[in-house]
Amino acid sequence: MLIDSHCHINSEDLRTQAAEVVSRAAEAGVEKMIIVGCDLDDSREAVELAHEFNFFASVGIHPHEAKRYTGITEEFYKLIRDERVIAVGEIGLDYHYDLSPRDVQTEIFECQLKFAEENNMPVILHIREAMDDAMKILREHRNLKLLFHCYAGGLKFLDEVLEMGGLCAFGGALTWKGKASDELREVFRRTPNDRILLETDCPYMAPAPLRGKTNEPAFIKFVYERAAQEKNLTLEELETIIEKNFENFFREKI
């Protein structure tokens, strides 16, 4: 069994062919996936697709979209109660693009962490070039279950992330060439086996040998293959580890 812990088949690139994308994923051995929300409309569609295809969804406000919100709307409270919703996310801070002012990103991030606490939900984190500020905030919410989507904290923050009980998700970048991916693979090798998940983040970040193409959940197999190689595991061993980690992290929701 393959699991894609973070995908956007509700994105503009994939939503019109969602059935075909899901069919190709099934052929590749993908049996579980989380369809991730980035704003209210996106979250609503994630939930609809999760019902249609018998997957899971998360709902939240991406830092890029934070400027459009002043808090959690009533509709989010309705969505969070849906049986297919298993996390709040993706939420966090993004200082790479700064598409929302940083103070607004912080305000909406903190608001959603409290929202997750109120509803006893894990959170899926998007943190890009903002680990120092994000960790300061997260230290005040140690009772939350944290999944660091596309983990980018390097070795500098890995020990603290693990001490917090966090899981680190790795995607297509694990398969790329270059210094940054070499460093990421070192981080991956040092991350304990019981703290990893794998993802596509489709339609973005397609793995080698498909880099530059529109990514989709079926391509998670390339991430699994490289991850197994880096961990010196068989593919079957890695599949068992990822399935166990997924079930343990979301066990109260799935």
Image (cartoon, rainbow, N blue to C red):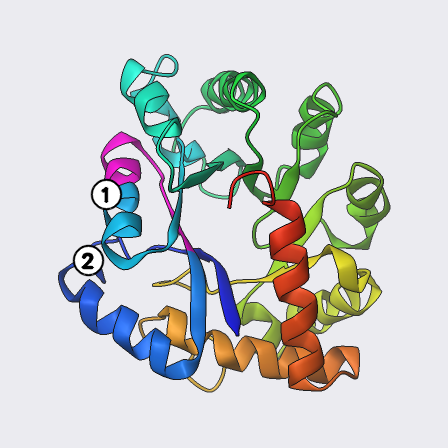
Q: Is residue 236 above or below residue 123?
A: below
Q: Is residue 91 left or right of residue 39?
A: right
Foreground residue among 202 and 221: 221
Three-letter code, disc 1? Glu
Q: Which one is earlier in the sequence, the residue at label 1 or at label 2?
A: 2
The residue under the point 72% across, 71% down is 185
Q: Is residue 118 above or below residue 231?
A: above
Q: Position of residue 212 (x, y in %)?
A: 37, 76
Contact between marks 1 and 2 (CB within 8 A): the answer is yes
- The residue pinned by badge 1 equals 45
Whether residue 35 is in magenta: the answer is yes
Foreground residue among 188 and 73: 73
Q: Is residue 58 left or right of residue 146?
A: left
Specify the segment rendered in magenta.
34-44
The residue under the point 49% across, 82% down is 208
Q: Is residue 233 above or below residue 125?
A: below
The residue under the point 23% across, 62% down is 14
Whether residue 96 is in magenta: the answer is no
Q: Position of residue 66 (x, y in %)?
A: 39, 26
Q: Quarter of the image holding residue 39?
A: top left
Q: Position of residue 53 (x, y in %)?
A: 27, 58
Numbered circles on residues, count: 2
Q: Is residue 183 left or right of residue 13?
A: right
